[in-house]
Amino acid sequence: MTTPVPAAEHAWLPKASCDASCIWVDAVHISRPFVVVLRTTVRLVMTMLLLPALPLLAVPLPGKSRIQRLYCRLMLRCLGVRISVSGGPIRNLSGVLVVAGHVSWVDIFAIGAVMPGSFVARADLIEWPALGFVARLLKVIPIDRHSLRGLPDVVRTVGDRLSAGQTVVAFPEGTTWCGLGHGTFAPAMFQAAIDTGRPVQPLQLTYRHRNGAQSTIPAFIGDDSLLTSIKRVITAKLTVCHMQVQSLQLPGTDRRDLAGRCQAAVQEVGPLPVAAVHGHTKAVWQAA
């Protein structure tokens, strides 16, 4: 006899195998307590000074995209994150679907610093104190991952934004991973690009320590609360977000093919030496 799946746990619901064991810091990246307190205090003050200006990003000002990019770069600096961009040129096109792997809430500022647009985000974000108000101002497209019924409306909304010449940012994995592991790109959101004939821009995000070692500190995974994740980022040493701009993908006619092409571009992977990831020792696949 088959046990029915609860309504909140559909078979298609994306799940990551990441948990707290994925997040670790070796002795090289640990600072003295006094340094941590000083660094954290400075970053908190800078962040609190910058936060009140966030709603201004919703105001239709001249040069709005440039202002958004500048704001996101400043916010990253306040949080102790630097961004490095490489790869292909960023084309000034209208109506582009931007896709990337999802590691952290930091992803939003990282992508906003390079290709600002409307984000497809979890529906309950709208209900969060303060953040929900900002999300509505910035016209975030809410998606309830627990509901298949609402998915066509989300795809339609994304298509409408693309047709209107807006940039839309989506995370097709549907949930966050630690950055050492990856999820599968769900094809649904790519249907909007096919329906409107708009291109897709894949971005590859990798978080590293200053010395180049990959960092899982920014990961927002498992039972993390937002405050816990923010604390981990803001107290850490410098984090560098490496963004690789991959080749622009034409939509074609098959959303699964398009999703596969974008996933291959974002997750250019190769085998690494055995390491402890996801709570046990296993071979790790990591963005090159």
Image (spheres, rainbow, N blue to C red):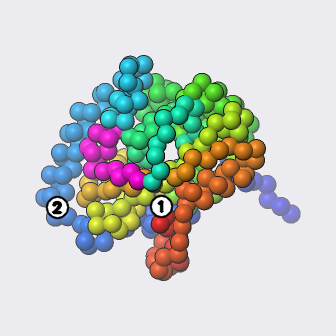
Q: Is residue 25 magenta?
A: no
- Label 1 or label 2, whichever comes before in sequence order: 2
Residues 199 and 128: in front is 199
Residue at image coords 58%, 32%: 95
278 or 81, which lies in front? Answer: 81
Which residues are drawn in magenta? 72-86
Marks 1/2: CA distance?
A: 27 Å
Q: Name the residue under label 1.
A: 179
State the image coordinates of residue 134 (x, y, percent, origin top left).
Answer: 43, 28
Mark 2 = which residue? 33
Residue type at numbered disc 2:
Pro
* 30 to 160, vertically: above or below: below
Q: What residue type is labelled 1?
A: Gly
Q: Percent x, y for residue 117? A: 49, 34
The reply to whether the magenta stretch includes residue 81 is yes
Figure quadrant of residue 199: top right
Q: In this view, does 79 lie above or below 140?
A: below
- Disc 1 to disc 2: CB gap under 8 Å: no
Residue under the image location 55 percent in, 51 percent down: 247
Q: What x and y, as percent, mark residue 252?
A: 72, 44
Where is residue 200 shown, x and y percent of the image? 60, 43
Q: In the rendered image, which quarter is residue 1 located in?
A: bottom right
Mark 1 is surrounded, within 10 Å at the Cα level, by few (under 14), some (14 to 19) or many (20 or more) other residues, namely: many
Badge 1 marks a residue whose secondary structure is: loop
